[in-house]
Amino acid sequence: MASVRLEKVCKAYGKHAVVHDLSMTIQDGECFTFLGPSGCGKTVVLRMIAGFEQPDSGEIWIGDTLVSSPARGVFLPPEKRRIGIVFQDYAVWPHKTVAENIIYPLTIQKVARTEAAERTSKTVAMVGLEGLGDRLPFQLSGGQQQRVALARALISRPQIMLLDEPLSNLDANLREEMRFEIKELQKNTGVTILYVTHDQEVALAISDRVAVMDESGVVRQVGAPDDIYEKPADSFVFKFMGVSNFIPLEWRSGNVFVKGSDSVLNCPLDAEQIEAVRSGTLVAGCRPHDVELSAEVSDNSGVVRRAVYLGSIIDYRISFGTVEIRAQKEIFEALTKSRIFREGETVGLRFLDLKWFREEDLAVAAGAAQ
Amino acid sequence: MIRHLKSMGIAEILLALSVLVLVVVVAIPVLLILGTAFFVDGHFNIKDVVQVLSEPDTYEALKNSLVIAAGVTVFSTIIGVFFAWLVSRTDLPFKGTMKLLFLIPFMLPSFIGALAWKMLLSPRSGYVTKLLMSSFGLESAPFNIYSLAGIIAVETMYLFPFVFIQVSGALERMDPTLEESARISGAGLFTITRRITLPLMMPSIGAGALLVALYSLAHFGVPAILGSEVGIYNIPTKIYERIYQSGGSFSAIRTATILSTILVVSAGVILYLQSFILKAGRFQVISGKSMRPVLLKLRGMKIPLLIFSIIYIAITVLLPTVTIFMVGTLKTYGIEFTAANMTLDNVKYILFDWKMTRDAIWNSFYISLAAAFVTMLVGTLISYVIVKMKVRGKFLLEFLGVLPFSVPGTVIALGVILMWSGRFGVNLYNTAWIILVAYIARYMAFSLKSNSAALEQVHDSLEEAARACGATHWQALKDIVIPLIKPGMVAAFFLIFLPALRELTTSVLLYGPKTRTIGVAIYALNEDGETVYAATLASVALVIIVVGQLVIKRVTRSKLEGE
């Protein structure tokens, strides 16, 4: 097992800089996720670590080995890096059986036949493919093919596992199951996992730490999943991690108003924040489930424009001053604590967990993919 | 550090090797042709070029080439589009079978077809001519096959499938909703065909027509058999005549290079037009999926059109083939087809007893085998670099890779003569090697096409997965890439081997006393008036072709089952 260290890594295709001055350390035995919208360069980072791409400048270390450094003329080819990789399209070799696919790394390493066979059957069992060894890949389901790819990557006991959107071709149920299994595998083997995805749910569920990247390849925040979710560094991260409301604010006669309206936002602010609101640079952010609705009409109430029934929850779109607020209530809670509101009704709003962002970040956040 | 250099080295070595092969095999010969055509004693000289072209017989050859190509293109397009429409857009019975039947003319070498038509329609002794004259009491022959019209007719019979394949493919892929929406708007079927279907098909029709033009312009076999005897020459036959009359003198070579330049330039223009048309056609709404189009009900015309199609196939394919087989078993040419006059001894004679034909078969066989094998491997290498590798300077290879597609067989033959006749210290003239080199150049395009198609199917991640598993670049190639593209390589092998077996255009300019090929032998036997033996050898060639096609089918089918 090994750590991975990126130091001032840059990569451009033609004039388009994909990765710029990226420095980061991934700890030994950690499950680390690069999370970002498509085209943010996260896959390029993975491919540079794997050795499929060479950085234009900077250094990449795996454990104590320098694997890429254009300045020092070092480039260790992928086969020497002791990595395991799983691709989005599985990349299971269609002309080899399941067993032949999985044993291939050991054949390359010239591991003795009996030992290889033993390790193969152990790995097959670990990923739950017993009895399918003689099948050809086209006879397998997508989930089974992905398990073959996992087993093939694991069998040579790599220092690091690189997973490039391995779950995005699977259906929702299978995705959840595989997510769990990848986590289990990591617990059992202690391998360092580097995971690349655009799916924030997977990233939260699987990672020890997450790096959130924006479209231009800039890392906005690195942290544990709960940090990222609860204490987003900026509005981009907040928006990328889930459905979000942004409320531009205005300071008038000692009160915080929703910009350009008479709706009041009742919230305690410290002096610095008040100053920021005064200069017009503060924006409040809030998750839909942190909006409390009540039948009491006050000066911070809005009108329900749409109420959509989504099974276990109800999704409201409420016009509040000049903005539209999304609120989500669990049906059970709505039925016991308050009530279900109809379209056109006026509701009182209370924001439980407001986060504060600077306005200039918002323009970037507006472009972020959900 | 060393690893770094080594791993970068592989890409560059492969690129350099690929460039080298294409430069030596195709680029230098073509450059030599251009150089010989335009430079005399090291000076650029356009006056001589104009003078050569204004000589009556070279001018005549140019004109004939154009007339033949134009005629063949027009008629092939009409016939190809009509039959393509018939099998893909009407309720003609047995459409699947009919579609296969329309592809058969492709398998029949056109010079063997010309040989058969000469036997059937020659003004004095043709079987059909005699039959028509006696049954209608005609004084003179109703047709003369030894004419521009005869050449155009025979070439059309064997070239129309180019258009047929392109157009029927496009018709089947066309989104039927386009026609349906026109229909809903109230347009009649005739209007729809004229205003919607036909315009949508224009790129495919154009592409097919240009292929026919390209092929016909540089075609040797049919004009050689039906034209040379009566003094009708096109560019390739003129080049052949000049070189053989003069025994390879410089002035003949120079005339030939000037004519070749015209062929190369026209081929370039045609290919450019074709890529232009195909690009323009890309925005056309043709979906990749096969859909069920609205079929025109032929009603009363159903059976007559079916019979018409069958008769067309019977006349263009069956009649010539049967003629070749029957004449091939005659004891002497001209006698009647009775059991007493027919014998299989001819076959035994040309296969085992007569050294000339025996050698020709053996030569064709081993030269084609070697050419197919080498071209397949080199084509795989070049395609791999073009499709898969990231390496600087690749554009050079991509440019060179287009060359083989645009150099006609006659030009290649002339180019290798210029290059391998001792000028650069290697003299291969009159050996099998020079034919082999020419075949590699001539069929490289087939290999590149087949191999790149196969390589594009192999996703990069399959190779990368192997690298991540610890395989070196070479091991990944050997264990993953090569096994996966094997079907494409096998296809390339046969796509080269079969046409090379019956090749005439190139080898007729390159053969020596000991290196006749099957095509050359048939051609020479026909020239010498040995019509029966020419037919016997042609029958043998046809049998080999049919067996080869069956093998291909077998191979490609087992590939499908394996997947």
Image (tube, coloured by chain):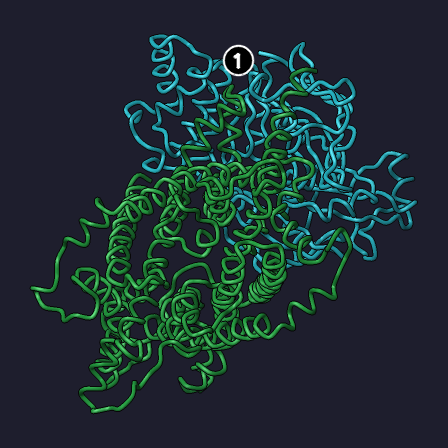
Chain colours: A cyan, B green
Q: Nearer the viewer, residue A135 or A76?
A: A76
Q: Mark 1 points at which residue?
A: A190
Q: Can residue A45 be seen in this view?
A: yes
Farthest left residue in view: B340
Left or right placement of residue B318 versus residue B210 in this view: left
- In percent of the image, x 39 and y 17: which residue is there? A123
B350 over B531 or under it: above or below: above
The percent position of residue B390, horizontal first and vertical second, equals 63, 36
Answer with the quarter of the image where residue B192 lies.
bottom left
B205 over B248 or under it: above or below: below
- In percent of the image, x 30 and y 66: which residue is there? B99
**Does dot 1 land on a helix, a strand or a loop?**
loop
Quadrant including the N terminus of chain A: top right
| Chain of residue at mark 1 | A
Q: Nearer the viewer, residue B179 or B212?
A: B212
- In percent of the image, x 16 and y 61: which residue is there? B331
